[in-house]
Image: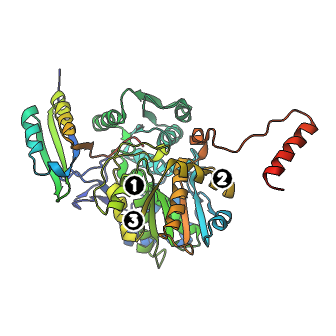
Amino acid sequence: MSEVKKLRVRLTFPQELIKEPVLFRMAKKYDVMPNIRRARVTDTFGEMILELEGLEKNLTEGINSLRQQGVVVELIEGDIIE
Amino acid sequence: MKYVKGLKCRECAREYPVEPIYVCEFCFGPLEAVYDYPKIKRALSRKVIEKRPKTLWRYKELLPIDGEPQVGLDSGFTPLVKADNLAKFLGVKELYIKDDTVNHPTLSFKDRVVAVALTKAKEFGFDTAACASTGNLAHAVSAHGAKAGFNRFIFIPSTLEQSKILASIVYEPNLVAVDGNYDDVNRLCSEIANKYRWAFVNINIRPFYAEGSKTIGFEIVEQLGWETPDSIVVPCASGSLLTKVWKALKEFKEIGIIKEMDTKIYGAQATGCSPISAAYKQGTDVVRPVKPNTIAKSLAIGNPADGYYALQAVKESGGAMEDVSDEEIIDAIKILAKKEGIFAETAGGVTLATYIKLLKEGKIDKKDCTVLCITGNGLKTAEVLDGKTAEVYHIKPNLSSFEEALKTINEKKGR
């Protein structure tokens, strides 16, 4: 059984996706609730710091779909393994 | 006595009390320790420091603890070696090696950050210390944690080589090998850190842990006779060390320990994992995550938590970033050993090779007084030199066999 989880992530969007509603589509399709805390968008890149909340299975599938579209999804902690 | 005022978000400047937290609840920015500098200025002077034992704790007012040091009481204050042979070889005026290959007890700069992290963990009342690491950090948490009486959990990817495991498991922590790639291990550790009340040194204790790196900067200044060098070359993994060395110099100026500070900070990365250097070269503030592919495993952080801040420190100081190939790293390890008798791990090779490259590019002046931060011992990454060292002369146990070998040796040297 999948449980509800929260995940704090940083999304980096490539230039070609800046104008696309990538996050909204993912949130709707996988029933994931995004809670945006910080964002920076310029002509050449987009960066967003947010929390995603949803069933673990949906979170995993939603993040995978973002990655497949070319969005870089990383934990806000950065790489923990040092 | 207490010299830390609290924690502060590096993004939105929101303030928090001193607690085992690491991220701003509002903007998810990283938290950093904030000090009462006027109070430190009254308490700390060159004279006070000079009277204390030669460990990293001689600067304790500038470290984020409330009481007395409890862990790593023999760590730090490593030699600042005047590298005259290497300076002559490279044609530079004045060069020093900050030699953390001999840090106590686990032979890397991680002894500094873990000493501070676990002292703070004791103050917070934690009984369990944890980290995720493939090398130096695991060794330091395992060893310091053993001495300090912590229950320890060390997480490693299950693919980690046996040689790397040994230097942790000998201290008998709970060593947990996680099936999965680096992303999986990172995500699991984040979940564990948020669920269990443990001191995860580089997650919930990170604001305190990272401050330990400042002691490299403090020591460099003191060991140069209370002078700052013209340039310092620092290896970059998460970018934290570089930002803290820069912070150390600024703090010494803030509290009047030094009057002038005109040091440039240079960041060194391996080309196979150079997200910060790439951002610098592209002239952007965005550090894009990469998949590491380099022999410099201790610097192989593809998504550096402090990459942005390291970039800002480099720019603010007027320094630069550069990166070097695996081949250049090996060559530099050998040059450092041959010229200065110091055996550095791959990160040390990265630092020296980057310095050589920056000299060639004219970004560091040959007349500069430069300090290279050599952060770990070569015995930890000895395998990278397999088949790349000088040859061994095998002889029979008689004089003629030896003399034959001697002839070969002398011919090689052109005598």
Q: Amino acid at mark 3?
A: Val
**Mark in front: 2 vs 1:** 2
Task: Specify the label residue B314 is tagged with.
Answer: 3
- As helix, strand or loop, the secondary structure at mark 1 comes to loop
Tell me if label 2 and label 1 are in contact, CB under 8 Å. Answer: no
Asked if residue B33 can be seen in this view, the reply is: no
- As helix, strand or loop, the secondary structure at mark 3 comes to helix
Q: Chain of mark 1?
A: B
Asked if residue B324 can be seen in this view, the reply is: yes
Image quarter in which the C terminus of chain B is found: bottom right
Q: Amino acid at mark 2?
A: Ala
Q: Amino acid at mark 1?
A: Gly
Q: CA distance from mark 2 to mark 1?
A: 26 Å
Image quarter in which the N terminus of chain B is found: bottom left
Task: Specify the label residue B239 is tagged with.
Answer: 1
Comes first in the chain, label 1 or label 3: 1
| Figure quadrant of residue B388 | top right
Task: Tell me the crowding category of disc 2: few under 14, some 14 to 19, or many 20 or more residues within 10 angstroms, Cα based.
Answer: some
